[in-house]
Image (cartoon, helix red, strand yellow):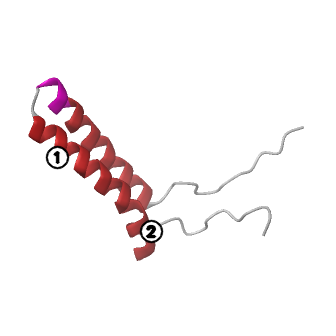
Amino acid sequence: MSHVEDHEGHGHSVAAWVSTAVMLVASAAACYGMVRANTGLMVTGAVVFVLGALLWPLLSRLGYGDKNPPRSLYS
């Protein structure tokens, strides 16, 4: 019998959605830049992708993160 954890709100926060949307658009722009041989667009997309990844913890610290983070089973 397996133990299944239920995480209410796991990833369902403004910080998660905004960061994921930024990274999705950035990866699409970088891929388009690669296909069109546009180095500037490709590099810009890659840089914005990294900024999107850093946006998640920043927004979480500003209060837009998960309001009820899951607790560890061992604490």
Q: Amino acid at mark 1?
A: Thr
Residue 73 is labelled as none
- Along the line of sight, the residue nearer the viewer: 14 or 56: 56
Residue at 53% from the left image edge and 65% from the top image edge: 66
Q: Position of residue 61 (x, y in %)?
A: 44, 74
Q: Pointer 2: what residue?
A: 60
Q: Identify the residue at horizontal 61%, vertical 67% (top origin).
A: 68
Distance from disc 2 to disc 1, alpha carbons, whole Å, reads 24 Å
Left or right: 48 in relation to 72: left
Quadrant of the image for the N terminus?
top right
Proximity of marks 2 and 1: CB atoms separated by less than 8 Å: no
Which residue is rendered at x = 40% and y = 53% of the image?
A: 17
In the shown orientation, is residue 12 left or right of residue 70? left
Q: Position of residue 24 (x, y in %)?
A: 32, 42
Percent of width and height locating residue 50: 31, 52
Question: Which residue is found at the position 22% from the left and 37% from the top?
Answer: 30
Residue at disc 1, secondary structure: helix
Residue 25 lies in the magenta stretch: no
* Amino acid type, label 2: Ser
Q: How many marks?
A: 2
Part of the protein shown in magenta: 32-36
Looking at the image, tell me whether mark 2 or mark 1 is earlier in sequence order: 1
Q: Which residue is mark 1?
A: 44
